Image (cartoon, rainbow, N blue to C red):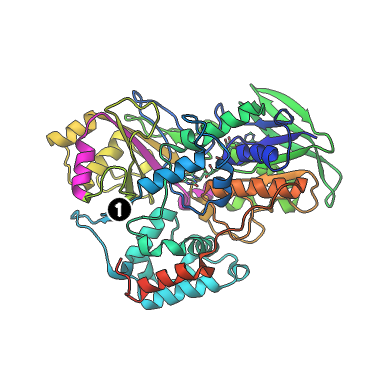
Amino acid sequence: MKAHIVGGGFGGLAAAALLIRNAGMSGPDITIYEADETLGGGFFLTGDANSGYNLPGSIFDKEFRCALDLLGKIPTQANPDIDVAEQFLTFNREHPFDDRTHILDHNLRRVHDQRYGLTLGDGLRLAKLSLTREASLDGQLIEDWFSPKFFGTEFWLLWSTQMGSLPQHTIIEFRRYLNRFVYLFPDLSTMANVLRSQFNQHEAFVQPLVAWLDTAQVNVVKDVFVSDIEFTGSDGDMTVSRLECVRGGASVSVDIASDDIVFVTTGSQAADLSAGTMATPPGPPLNPGRSWALWKKLAAKHAGFGNPDAFFGDDRIADSRWVTFTVTTTGSEFLDELTGLTHSGAGSGGLLTLKDSNWVISLSIFEQPEVLNQPPGTSIWWGYGLFPEKPGNFHPKPMHRCTGEEILREVLQHLGLKQGEPKTEKIVATSICIPCNMPYVNNIWLRRQRGDRPPVVPDGVTNLGLLGQYVELERDIAFTFEYSTRTAWEAVYRLLKRGPAPPNVYQGQFDLAAVWAAAKVFLGLTPV
Ligand SMILES: Cc1cc2nc3c(=O)[nH]c(=O)nc-3n(C[C@H](O)[C@H](O)[C@H](O)COP(=O)(O)OP(=O)(O)OC[C@H]3O[C@@H](n4cnc5c(N)ncnc54)[C@H](O)[C@@H]3O)c2cc1C
Protein backbone atom coordinates (compact mmCIF):
# COMPACT_ATOMS: atom_id res chain seq x y z
CA MET A 1 0.00 0.00 0.00
CA LYS A 2 1.25 3.47 -0.91
CA ALA A 3 -0.02 6.87 0.23
CA HIS A 4 -0.21 9.91 -2.05
CA ILE A 5 -0.66 13.31 -0.44
CA VAL A 6 -1.66 16.35 -2.50
CA GLY A 7 -0.48 19.58 -0.85
CA GLY A 8 2.64 20.16 1.21
CA GLY A 9 1.14 22.64 3.67
CA PHE A 10 1.05 21.77 7.34
CA GLY A 11 -2.00 19.52 6.74
CA GLY A 12 -0.24 17.40 4.11
CA LEU A 13 2.95 17.20 6.18
CA ALA A 14 0.92 16.21 9.25
CA ALA A 15 -0.84 13.49 7.23
CA ALA A 16 2.53 12.00 6.26
CA ALA A 17 3.78 12.08 9.85
CA LEU A 18 0.57 10.57 11.22
CA LEU A 19 0.62 7.80 8.61
CA ILE A 20 4.02 6.83 10.00
CA ARG A 21 3.34 7.44 13.67
CA ASN A 22 -0.30 6.30 14.01
CA ALA A 23 -0.70 3.84 11.17
CA GLY A 24 2.81 2.33 11.04
CA MET A 25 3.40 3.10 7.36
CA SER A 26 6.95 3.33 6.16
CA GLY A 27 8.24 6.69 4.91
CA PRO A 28 9.35 5.54 1.43
CA ASP A 29 5.74 4.40 0.75
CA ILE A 30 4.49 7.98 1.17
CA THR A 31 4.72 10.74 -1.45
CA ILE A 32 3.81 14.40 -1.01
CA TYR A 33 2.99 16.42 -4.16
CA GLU A 34 3.34 20.18 -3.77
CA ALA A 35 2.56 22.72 -6.51
CA ASP A 36 4.88 25.39 -5.07
CA GLU A 37 8.66 25.33 -4.93
CA THR A 38 8.51 25.34 -1.15
CA LEU A 39 6.62 23.41 1.50
CA GLY A 40 4.55 25.04 4.22
CA GLY A 41 1.67 26.69 2.32
CA GLY A 42 0.14 29.36 4.58
CA PHE A 43 3.09 29.10 6.97
CA PHE A 44 5.43 30.81 4.53
CA LEU A 45 8.68 32.69 5.03
CA THR A 46 10.08 34.62 2.08
CA GLY A 47 12.57 37.42 1.54
CA ASP A 48 15.60 38.32 3.60
CA ALA A 49 16.98 41.18 5.65
CA ASN A 50 18.13 43.06 2.54
CA SER A 51 14.93 42.83 0.51
CA GLY A 52 12.53 42.62 3.49
CA TYR A 53 10.92 39.53 4.98
CA ASN A 54 7.34 38.44 4.32
CA LEU A 55 5.64 36.18 6.86
CA PRO A 56 2.26 35.67 8.56
CA GLY A 57 1.27 36.72 12.09
CA SER A 58 0.80 34.08 14.73
CA ILE A 59 -2.04 33.17 17.11
CA PHE A 60 -2.53 29.84 18.88
CA ASP A 61 -3.73 28.50 22.23
CA LYS A 62 -2.94 25.60 24.52
CA GLU A 63 -5.89 23.52 23.26
CA PHE A 64 -4.36 22.79 19.84
CA ARG A 65 -4.52 19.17 20.94
CA CYS A 66 -3.78 17.38 17.66
CA ALA A 67 -1.03 19.73 16.52
CA LEU A 68 0.71 19.78 19.91
CA ASP A 69 0.45 16.02 20.21
CA LEU A 70 2.09 15.64 16.80
CA LEU A 71 4.75 18.28 17.47
CA GLY A 72 5.45 16.63 20.83
CA LYS A 73 7.21 13.88 18.85
CA ILE A 74 9.15 16.17 16.53
CA PRO A 75 12.59 17.33 17.72
CA THR A 76 13.59 20.96 17.36
CA GLN A 77 16.42 21.55 14.95
CA ALA A 78 18.48 23.46 17.53
CA ASN A 79 18.34 20.70 20.14
CA PRO A 80 17.13 17.16 19.38
CA ASP A 81 16.42 16.61 23.10
CA ILE A 82 13.74 19.31 23.05
CA ASP A 83 10.61 18.68 21.02
CA VAL A 84 8.77 21.40 19.10
CA ALA A 85 5.69 21.39 21.37
CA GLU A 86 7.84 21.69 24.48
CA GLN A 87 9.78 24.59 22.95
CA PHE A 88 6.53 26.33 22.01
CA LEU A 89 4.86 25.86 25.41
CA THR A 90 7.98 26.75 27.40
CA PHE A 91 8.50 29.92 25.39
CA ASN A 92 4.90 31.00 25.99
CA ARG A 93 5.07 30.14 29.69
CA GLU A 94 8.21 32.25 30.05
CA HIS A 95 7.04 35.08 27.76
CA PRO A 96 3.27 35.43 28.17
CA PHE A 97 1.52 38.25 26.36
CA ASP A 98 0.78 41.18 28.63
CA ASP A 99 -0.90 43.65 26.33
CA ARG A 100 -1.14 46.93 28.23
CA THR A 101 -2.68 48.90 25.36
CA HIS A 102 -4.69 46.91 22.87
CA ILE A 103 -6.75 49.65 21.24
CA LEU A 104 -5.89 53.27 20.45
CA ASP A 105 -8.29 55.91 19.09
CA HIS A 106 -7.38 58.73 16.70
CA ASN A 107 -6.17 60.85 19.63
CA LEU A 108 -3.83 58.01 20.60
CA ARG A 109 -5.90 57.46 23.72
CA ARG A 110 -6.19 53.95 25.09
CA VAL A 111 -9.71 52.55 24.65
CA HIS A 112 -10.82 50.17 27.35
CA ASP A 113 -14.29 49.74 28.86
CA GLN A 114 -15.81 47.88 31.77
CA ARG A 115 -17.00 44.47 30.53
CA TYR A 116 -15.46 45.39 27.15
CA GLY A 117 -18.54 47.58 26.60
CA LEU A 118 -20.92 44.62 26.68
CA THR A 119 -24.26 44.63 28.46
CA LEU A 120 -25.71 41.81 30.51
CA GLY A 121 -28.16 41.37 27.61
CA ASP A 122 -25.21 40.78 25.24
CA GLY A 123 -23.92 38.17 27.67
CA LEU A 124 -27.27 36.36 27.66
CA ARG A 125 -27.40 36.49 23.86
CA LEU A 126 -23.89 35.01 23.64
CA ALA A 127 -24.90 32.31 26.13
CA LYS A 128 -28.01 31.52 24.08
CA LEU A 129 -25.94 31.20 20.91
CA SER A 130 -23.43 28.98 22.66
CA LEU A 131 -26.21 26.55 23.59
CA THR A 132 -28.03 26.66 20.23
CA ARG A 133 -27.62 23.58 18.04
CA GLU A 134 -25.35 24.23 15.09
CA ALA A 135 -27.71 22.41 12.74
CA SER A 136 -30.31 25.15 13.21
CA LEU A 137 -27.90 27.94 12.18
CA ASP A 138 -27.40 27.02 8.52
CA GLY A 139 -26.82 30.06 6.32
CA GLN A 140 -27.26 32.55 9.20
CA LEU A 141 -24.94 35.48 9.76
CA ILE A 142 -23.47 37.02 12.90
CA GLU A 143 -25.40 40.25 12.22
CA ASP A 144 -28.64 38.25 12.30
CA TRP A 145 -27.96 37.53 15.97
CA PHE A 146 -26.73 40.77 17.49
CA SER A 147 -27.80 44.43 17.54
CA PRO A 148 -25.77 47.06 15.62
CA LYS A 149 -24.63 48.39 19.05
CA PHE A 150 -22.89 45.09 19.80
CA PHE A 151 -20.64 45.61 16.77
CA GLY A 152 -19.50 48.95 18.19
CA THR A 153 -18.25 47.49 21.47
CA GLU A 154 -14.66 47.02 22.53
CA PHE A 155 -15.44 43.30 22.80
CA TRP A 156 -16.28 43.10 19.12
CA LEU A 157 -13.13 44.95 18.10
CA LEU A 158 -10.96 42.73 20.30
CA TRP A 159 -12.69 39.64 19.01
CA SER A 160 -12.76 40.48 15.32
CA THR A 161 -9.14 41.65 15.19
CA GLN A 162 -7.91 38.49 16.95
CA MET A 163 -10.27 35.98 15.31
CA GLY A 164 -11.09 37.63 11.97
CA SER A 165 -14.91 37.64 12.09
CA LEU A 166 -17.02 40.45 10.59
CA PRO A 167 -20.78 41.06 11.11
CA GLN A 168 -21.57 39.66 7.63
CA HIS A 169 -19.78 36.37 8.38
CA THR A 170 -21.20 32.98 9.33
CA ILE A 171 -22.73 32.54 12.76
CA ILE A 172 -21.75 28.86 12.62
CA GLU A 173 -18.04 29.58 12.83
CA PHE A 174 -18.65 32.37 15.35
CA ARG A 175 -20.47 29.94 17.64
CA ARG A 176 -17.64 27.44 17.32
CA TYR A 177 -15.09 30.15 18.20
CA LEU A 178 -17.21 31.27 21.12
CA ASN A 179 -17.33 27.78 22.59
CA ARG A 180 -13.67 27.11 21.94
CA PHE A 181 -12.47 30.40 23.37
CA VAL A 182 -14.91 31.21 26.17
CA TYR A 183 -12.03 30.71 28.59
CA LEU A 184 -10.17 33.65 26.99
CA PHE A 185 -12.87 36.16 28.01
CA PRO A 186 -11.27 37.56 31.18
CA ASP A 187 -7.97 38.16 29.33
CA LEU A 188 -9.23 39.19 25.92
CA SER A 189 -7.57 42.59 26.17
CA THR A 190 -4.21 41.49 27.60
CA MET A 191 -4.19 38.34 25.43
CA ALA A 192 -2.61 36.55 28.41
CA ASN A 193 -3.73 33.08 27.29
CA VAL A 194 -3.13 33.58 23.58
CA LEU A 195 0.06 31.83 22.47
CA ARG A 196 2.43 32.49 19.60
CA SER A 197 5.37 30.71 18.07
CA GLN A 198 8.80 31.72 19.39
CA PHE A 199 9.83 32.67 15.87
CA ASN A 200 8.06 32.49 12.52
CA GLN A 201 5.85 29.41 11.97
CA HIS A 202 7.83 28.21 8.97
CA GLU A 203 11.00 27.76 11.01
CA ALA A 204 9.19 26.89 14.25
CA PHE A 205 6.81 24.24 12.91
CA VAL A 206 7.26 23.44 9.21
CA GLN A 207 11.03 22.99 9.01
CA PRO A 208 11.36 20.57 11.97
CA LEU A 209 8.46 18.48 10.64
CA VAL A 210 9.97 18.41 7.15
CA ALA A 211 13.33 17.38 8.64
CA TRP A 212 11.62 14.54 10.54
CA LEU A 213 9.83 13.37 7.37
CA ASP A 214 13.11 13.58 5.51
CA THR A 215 14.78 11.30 8.08
CA ALA A 216 11.85 8.90 7.63
CA GLN A 217 12.53 8.99 3.86
CA VAL A 218 9.15 10.33 2.82
CA ASN A 219 9.19 11.28 -0.86
CA VAL A 220 8.53 14.95 -1.53
CA VAL A 221 7.90 16.19 -5.07
CA LYS A 222 7.76 19.97 -5.40
CA ASP A 223 6.67 22.04 -8.38
CA VAL A 224 4.06 19.48 -9.32
CA PHE A 225 0.43 20.52 -9.61
CA VAL A 226 -2.14 17.74 -9.34
CA SER A 227 -4.69 18.90 -11.89
CA ASP A 228 -7.25 16.09 -11.76
CA ILE A 229 -8.13 12.81 -10.11
CA GLU A 230 -9.65 9.89 -11.94
CA PHE A 231 -11.88 7.31 -10.31
CA THR A 232 -13.07 3.84 -11.17
CA GLY A 233 -16.56 2.75 -10.13
CA SER A 234 -19.59 4.95 -9.83
CA ASP A 235 -21.32 7.16 -7.27
CA GLY A 236 -21.64 4.83 -4.27
CA ASP A 237 -18.30 3.08 -4.75
CA MET A 238 -15.65 5.39 -6.18
CA THR A 239 -11.96 4.50 -5.98
CA VAL A 240 -9.13 6.79 -7.05
CA SER A 241 -7.25 5.19 -9.94
CA ARG A 242 -5.02 7.97 -11.23
CA LEU A 243 -3.59 11.39 -10.44
CA GLU A 244 -3.14 13.74 -13.38
CA CYS A 245 -0.26 16.11 -12.77
CA VAL A 246 1.50 19.00 -14.45
CA ARG A 247 5.22 19.31 -13.88
CA GLY A 248 7.43 21.84 -15.67
CA GLY A 249 4.66 22.36 -18.24
CA ALA A 250 4.44 18.64 -19.03
CA SER A 251 1.57 16.31 -18.14
CA VAL A 252 2.41 13.33 -15.96
CA SER A 253 0.09 10.57 -14.72
CA VAL A 254 0.48 8.62 -11.49
CA ASP A 255 -1.36 5.31 -11.37
CA ILE A 256 -3.01 4.55 -8.04
CA ALA A 257 -3.40 0.88 -7.05
CA SER A 258 -6.73 -0.13 -5.55
CA ASP A 259 -5.17 -0.59 -2.09
CA ASP A 260 -3.37 2.78 -2.20
CA ILE A 261 -4.74 5.79 -0.36
CA VAL A 262 -4.87 9.40 -1.48
CA PHE A 263 -5.15 12.59 0.60
CA VAL A 264 -6.04 15.91 -0.99
CA THR A 265 -5.74 19.43 0.44
CA THR A 266 -8.77 21.08 -1.13
CA GLY A 267 -7.80 24.72 -0.81
CA SER A 268 -5.57 27.27 0.87
CA GLN A 269 -6.16 30.45 2.81
CA ALA A 270 -2.98 31.66 1.14
CA ALA A 271 -4.56 31.12 -2.30
CA ASP A 272 -3.62 33.78 -4.86
CA LEU A 273 -1.31 35.51 -2.41
CA SER A 274 0.97 38.13 -3.94
CA ALA A 275 3.58 40.36 -2.36
CA GLY A 276 4.72 43.85 -3.32
CA THR A 277 7.81 45.83 -2.37
CA MET A 278 8.54 49.12 -0.65
CA ALA A 279 8.03 50.81 -4.05
CA THR A 280 5.36 48.62 -5.69
CA PRO A 281 1.95 47.34 -4.62
CA PRO A 282 1.29 43.57 -4.74
CA GLY A 283 0.89 42.42 -8.33
CA PRO A 284 -1.45 39.79 -9.75
CA PRO A 285 -0.98 36.25 -8.38
CA LEU A 286 1.39 33.94 -10.25
CA ASN A 287 -1.05 31.05 -10.59
CA PRO A 288 -4.57 32.37 -10.09
CA GLY A 289 -7.06 29.80 -8.88
CA ARG A 290 -4.53 26.98 -8.60
CA SER A 291 -5.05 26.24 -4.91
CA TRP A 292 -8.69 25.26 -5.28
CA ALA A 293 -8.72 24.13 -8.95
CA LEU A 294 -8.58 20.45 -8.01
CA TRP A 295 -11.42 20.85 -5.51
CA LYS A 296 -13.53 22.43 -8.29
CA LYS A 297 -12.84 19.42 -10.52
CA LEU A 298 -13.80 17.01 -7.73
CA ALA A 299 -16.97 18.93 -6.89
CA ALA A 300 -18.01 18.79 -10.54
CA LYS A 301 -17.68 14.98 -10.47
CA HIS A 302 -19.70 14.26 -7.33
CA ALA A 303 -21.99 16.35 -5.08
CA GLY A 304 -20.40 14.79 -1.99
CA PHE A 305 -17.28 16.87 -2.57
CA GLY A 306 -18.97 20.08 -1.41
CA ASN A 307 -19.11 23.57 -2.83
CA PRO A 308 -15.83 25.44 -3.43
CA ASP A 309 -17.78 28.46 -4.75
CA ALA A 310 -18.88 29.20 -1.18
CA PHE A 311 -15.25 30.11 -0.40
CA PHE A 312 -13.38 30.87 -3.63
CA GLY A 313 -13.99 33.06 -6.71
CA ASP A 314 -13.93 36.80 -7.44
CA ASP A 315 -17.25 37.49 -5.73
CA ARG A 316 -15.95 36.04 -2.43
CA ILE A 317 -12.98 38.39 -2.07
CA ALA A 318 -14.67 41.52 -0.66
CA ASP A 319 -15.52 39.81 2.64
CA SER A 320 -12.39 37.69 2.78
CA ARG A 321 -9.36 39.78 1.83
CA TRP A 322 -6.66 40.92 4.24
CA VAL A 323 -3.57 42.84 3.36
CA THR A 324 -0.70 42.09 5.70
CA PHE A 325 2.62 43.86 5.86
CA THR A 326 5.93 42.76 7.32
CA VAL A 327 8.42 45.45 8.24
CA THR A 328 12.14 44.76 8.51
CA THR A 329 13.93 47.62 10.19
CA THR A 330 17.49 48.46 11.15
CA GLY A 331 16.48 51.44 13.29
CA SER A 332 15.10 51.38 16.82
CA GLU A 333 12.92 54.51 16.49
CA PHE A 334 9.66 52.79 15.62
CA LEU A 335 9.89 50.14 18.32
CA ASP A 336 10.88 52.77 20.91
CA GLU A 337 7.96 54.95 19.84
CA LEU A 338 5.49 52.08 20.13
CA THR A 339 6.81 50.84 23.45
CA GLY A 340 6.52 54.38 24.83
CA LEU A 341 2.96 54.64 23.55
CA THR A 342 1.66 51.26 24.67
CA HIS A 343 3.81 50.52 27.76
CA SER A 344 4.02 46.94 26.48
CA GLY A 345 7.53 45.57 26.07
CA ALA A 346 8.58 44.42 22.57
CA GLY A 347 7.19 40.94 22.01
CA SER A 348 4.77 41.03 24.94
CA GLY A 349 2.18 43.35 23.46
CA GLY A 350 -0.01 41.00 21.43
CA LEU A 351 -1.87 43.26 19.00
CA LEU A 352 -2.21 47.02 18.89
CA THR A 353 -5.32 48.08 16.98
CA LEU A 354 -5.66 51.57 15.53
CA LYS A 355 -9.39 51.68 15.92
CA ASP A 356 -10.14 54.78 13.86
CA SER A 357 -8.01 53.85 10.86
CA ASN A 358 -10.24 53.11 7.87
CA TRP A 359 -8.40 49.85 7.29
CA VAL A 360 -8.63 49.00 11.03
CA ILE A 361 -4.90 48.37 11.19
CA SER A 362 -3.51 46.03 13.86
CA LEU A 363 0.20 45.80 14.64
CA SER A 364 2.25 43.12 16.30
CA ILE A 365 5.80 43.58 17.53
CA PHE A 366 7.47 40.20 17.61
CA GLU A 367 9.88 38.89 20.18
CA GLN A 368 13.22 39.16 18.35
CA PRO A 369 14.63 37.43 16.45
CA GLU A 370 11.52 36.49 14.47
CA VAL A 371 13.68 34.84 11.80
CA LEU A 372 16.48 32.60 12.99
CA ASN A 373 19.28 34.09 10.91
CA GLN A 374 18.02 37.65 11.22
CA PRO A 375 21.12 39.89 11.39
CA PRO A 376 21.82 41.50 14.79
CA GLY A 377 20.43 45.03 14.94
CA THR A 378 17.53 44.13 12.65
CA SER A 379 13.97 43.89 13.97
CA ILE A 380 10.79 42.59 12.37
CA TRP A 381 7.27 43.72 13.06
CA TRP A 382 4.00 42.94 11.35
CA GLY A 383 0.53 44.25 10.78
CA TYR A 384 -2.66 43.77 8.81
CA GLY A 385 -5.79 45.59 7.77
CA LEU A 386 -9.16 44.05 8.58
CA PHE A 387 -10.93 46.34 6.07
CA PRO A 388 -8.36 46.64 3.26
CA GLU A 389 -10.98 47.35 0.59
CA LYS A 390 -11.66 50.80 2.07
CA PRO A 391 -9.58 53.83 1.07
CA GLY A 392 -6.87 54.67 3.60
CA ASN A 393 -7.24 57.88 5.64
CA PHE A 394 -4.02 59.40 4.30
CA HIS A 395 -3.63 57.33 1.13
CA PRO A 396 -7.14 57.27 -0.30
CA LYS A 397 -7.04 53.91 -2.07
CA PRO A 398 -7.59 50.27 -1.10
CA MET A 399 -4.73 48.77 0.85
CA HIS A 400 -3.83 46.19 -1.82
CA ARG A 401 -3.22 49.05 -4.28
CA CYS A 402 -0.63 50.63 -1.95
CA THR A 403 3.13 50.23 -1.97
CA GLY A 404 4.95 49.17 1.16
CA GLU A 405 6.07 52.74 1.75
CA GLU A 406 2.51 54.05 1.48
CA ILE A 407 1.26 51.52 4.02
CA LEU A 408 4.14 52.28 6.38
CA ARG A 409 3.51 56.04 6.11
CA GLU A 410 -0.21 55.47 6.70
CA VAL A 411 0.59 53.60 9.93
CA LEU A 412 3.05 56.30 11.03
CA GLN A 413 0.57 59.08 10.38
CA HIS A 414 -2.04 57.31 12.50
CA LEU A 415 0.57 57.21 15.25
CA GLY A 416 1.10 60.96 14.99
CA LEU A 417 4.39 60.67 13.09
CA LYS A 418 3.85 63.19 10.34
CA GLN A 419 5.43 63.12 6.91
CA GLY A 420 8.63 65.21 6.73
CA GLU A 421 9.41 65.08 10.45
CA PRO A 422 12.95 63.77 11.12
CA LYS A 423 11.79 60.77 13.16
CA THR A 424 9.26 59.75 10.51
CA GLU A 425 11.79 60.02 7.72
CA LYS A 426 14.39 58.09 9.75
CA ILE A 427 11.90 55.26 10.31
CA VAL A 428 10.99 55.15 6.62
CA ALA A 429 14.66 55.27 5.57
CA THR A 430 15.59 52.37 7.85
CA SER A 431 12.55 50.16 7.13
CA ILE A 432 11.49 47.82 4.36
CA CYS A 433 7.74 47.24 4.38
CA ILE A 434 6.53 44.31 2.27
CA PRO A 435 2.79 44.40 1.56
CA CYS A 436 1.07 41.07 0.96
CA ASN A 437 -2.34 40.78 -0.66
CA MET A 438 -4.29 37.75 0.53
CA PRO A 439 -7.67 37.68 -1.19
CA TYR A 440 -8.87 34.47 0.47
CA VAL A 441 -7.22 34.43 3.87
CA ASN A 442 -10.44 35.11 5.76
CA ASN A 443 -12.78 33.03 3.61
CA ILE A 444 -13.29 30.40 6.29
CA TRP A 445 -15.65 32.99 7.82
CA LEU A 446 -17.88 33.33 4.75
CA ARG A 447 -21.56 32.40 4.98
CA ARG A 448 -21.91 28.65 4.62
CA GLN A 449 -24.47 25.85 4.58
CA ARG A 450 -24.05 22.31 5.70
CA GLY A 451 -22.46 20.34 2.88
CA ASP A 452 -20.39 23.26 1.54
CA ARG A 453 -17.39 21.67 3.21
CA PRO A 454 -17.22 17.95 2.44
CA PRO A 455 -16.52 15.37 5.14
CA VAL A 456 -12.96 14.11 5.68
CA VAL A 457 -13.88 10.94 3.82
CA PRO A 458 -16.68 11.75 1.37
CA ASP A 459 -19.54 9.23 1.23
CA GLY A 460 -19.08 6.48 -1.32
CA VAL A 461 -15.36 7.07 -1.84
CA THR A 462 -13.16 4.19 -0.78
CA ASN A 463 -9.57 5.45 -0.72
CA LEU A 464 -9.62 9.25 -0.57
CA GLY A 465 -9.31 11.54 2.45
CA LEU A 466 -9.59 15.33 2.38
CA LEU A 467 -7.35 17.71 4.31
CA GLY A 468 -7.30 21.32 5.41
CA GLN A 469 -9.59 24.19 6.29
CA TYR A 470 -12.34 23.40 3.74
CA VAL A 471 -13.30 20.02 5.16
CA GLU A 472 -16.07 19.57 7.70
CA LEU A 473 -15.15 18.49 11.21
CA GLU A 474 -17.49 18.63 14.15
CA ARG A 475 -16.93 21.46 16.60
CA ASP A 476 -13.40 22.53 15.71
CA ILE A 477 -12.49 26.02 14.48
CA ALA A 478 -10.85 26.90 11.17
CA PHE A 479 -8.02 29.40 10.53
CA THR A 480 -5.85 27.12 12.63
CA PHE A 481 -3.17 24.58 11.86
CA GLU A 482 -4.90 22.50 14.51
CA TYR A 483 -7.83 22.14 12.11
CA SER A 484 -5.60 20.95 9.26
CA THR A 485 -3.81 18.52 11.59
CA ARG A 486 -7.12 17.20 12.90
CA THR A 487 -8.40 16.55 9.36
CA ALA A 488 -5.17 14.63 8.69
CA TRP A 489 -5.50 12.58 11.88
CA GLU A 490 -9.19 11.87 11.24
CA ALA A 491 -8.51 10.87 7.61
CA VAL A 492 -5.71 8.46 8.59
CA TYR A 493 -7.88 7.00 11.35
CA ARG A 494 -10.94 6.55 9.13
CA LEU A 495 -9.21 5.25 6.01
CA LEU A 496 -6.71 2.90 7.66
CA LYS A 497 -8.60 2.14 10.87
CA ARG A 498 -5.31 2.18 12.74
CA GLY A 499 -3.98 4.16 15.67
CA PRO A 500 -5.95 6.24 18.17
CA ALA A 501 -8.86 8.50 17.24
CA PRO A 502 -8.05 12.23 17.43
CA PRO A 503 -8.44 13.78 20.90
CA ASN A 504 -11.73 15.60 21.59
CA VAL A 505 -12.05 19.26 20.73
CA TYR A 506 -11.94 21.44 23.87
CA GLN A 507 -15.43 22.84 24.47
CA GLY A 508 -15.44 25.77 26.87
CA GLN A 509 -19.22 25.79 27.29
CA PHE A 510 -18.88 22.57 29.32
CA ASP A 511 -15.87 23.82 31.29
CA LEU A 512 -17.53 25.20 34.41
CA ALA A 513 -14.46 27.13 35.56
CA ALA A 514 -14.23 28.85 32.16
CA VAL A 515 -17.95 29.65 32.03
CA TRP A 516 -17.89 31.04 35.58
CA ALA A 517 -14.81 33.16 34.81
CA ALA A 518 -16.58 34.62 31.74
CA ALA A 519 -19.82 35.15 33.72
CA LYS A 520 -17.88 37.09 36.35
CA VAL A 521 -16.76 39.52 33.64
CA PHE A 522 -20.40 40.14 32.66
CA LEU A 523 -21.52 40.45 36.28
CA GLY A 524 -18.80 43.01 36.90
CA LEU A 525 -17.16 40.75 39.51
CA THR A 526 -13.90 40.52 37.53
CA PRO A 527 -12.57 43.87 36.35
CA VAL A 528 -11.00 43.49 32.93
C1 LIG B 1 -1.47 34.72 6.67
C2 LIG B 1 -1.90 33.53 7.43
C3 LIG B 1 -1.78 33.53 8.80
C4 LIG B 1 -2.15 32.41 9.53
N1 LIG B 1 -1.99 32.42 10.88
C5 LIG B 1 -2.30 31.32 11.59
C6 LIG B 1 -2.05 31.27 12.99
O1 LIG B 1 -1.57 32.22 13.57
N2 LIG B 1 -2.40 30.16 13.67
C7 LIG B 1 -2.92 29.08 13.04
O2 LIG B 1 -3.16 28.08 13.69
N3 LIG B 1 -3.17 29.11 11.71
C8 LIG B 1 -2.89 30.20 10.98
N4 LIG B 1 -3.12 30.23 9.64
C9 LIG B 1 -3.88 29.19 9.02
C10 LIG B 1 -2.96 28.27 8.25
O3 LIG B 1 -3.26 28.39 6.91
C11 LIG B 1 -3.18 26.89 8.71
O4 LIG B 1 -2.90 26.92 10.07
C12 LIG B 1 -2.34 25.80 8.06
O5 LIG B 1 -1.04 26.24 7.79
C13 LIG B 1 -3.01 25.35 6.82
O6 LIG B 1 -2.37 24.19 6.35
P1 LIG B 1 -2.95 23.42 5.10
O7 LIG B 1 -1.97 22.37 4.76
O8 LIG B 1 -4.34 23.00 5.35
O9 LIG B 1 -3.06 24.48 3.94
P2 LIG B 1 -1.94 25.40 3.31
O10 LIG B 1 -0.92 25.76 4.30
O11 LIG B 1 -2.67 26.48 2.65
O12 LIG B 1 -1.23 24.47 2.24
C14 LIG B 1 -1.90 23.92 1.15
C15 LIG B 1 -0.83 23.52 0.16
O13 LIG B 1 -1.42 22.70 -0.85
C16 LIG B 1 -0.85 23.04 -2.09
N5 LIG B 1 -1.78 22.61 -3.13
C17 LIG B 1 -3.10 22.96 -3.23
N6 LIG B 1 -3.65 22.34 -4.30
C18 LIG B 1 -2.66 21.60 -4.86
C19 LIG B 1 -2.62 20.75 -6.01
N7 LIG B 1 -3.72 20.53 -6.73
N8 LIG B 1 -1.46 20.14 -6.32
C20 LIG B 1 -0.35 20.32 -5.52
N9 LIG B 1 -0.34 21.14 -4.45
C21 LIG B 1 -1.48 21.76 -4.12
C22 LIG B 1 -0.68 24.54 -2.01
O14 LIG B 1 0.29 24.99 -2.93
C23 LIG B 1 -0.23 24.72 -0.55
O15 LIG B 1 1.16 24.68 -0.41
C24 LIG B 1 -2.71 31.31 8.87
C25 LIG B 1 -2.83 31.33 7.48
C26 LIG B 1 -2.41 32.41 6.77
C27 LIG B 1 -2.52 32.36 5.27
Q: The residue under label 1 is which amino acid type?
A: Asp
Q: Quadrant of the N terminus?
A: top right
Q: Is residue 235 visible?
A: yes
- Above-or-below relation of 206 to 155: above
Whether residue 414 is situated above or below residue 185 in the rendered picture: above
Write down the region rendered in magenta: 313-341
- Residue at the outermost front position: 81
Whether the magenta-drawn stretch holds residue 334 is answered as: yes
> Residue 497, position in %: x, y?
77, 48
Foreground of the two, 88 or 247: 88
- Where 257 falls versus 296 (above or below)? above
Q: Please identify the quarter of the rendering in which residue 516 is found.
A: bottom left
Residue drawn where x is 68% and y is 50% of the image: 490
For image coordinates 53% across by 62% down, the residue present is 176
Q: Residue 440's spot in the image, x, y percent?
A: 50, 45
Which residue is at 46% across, 40% downward?
Answer: 87
Image-based side of 198 in relation to 240, left or right = left
Classify mark 1: residues with Cα within 10 Å, few (<14), some (14-19) or many (20+): many
Q: Which residue is mark 1?
A: 99
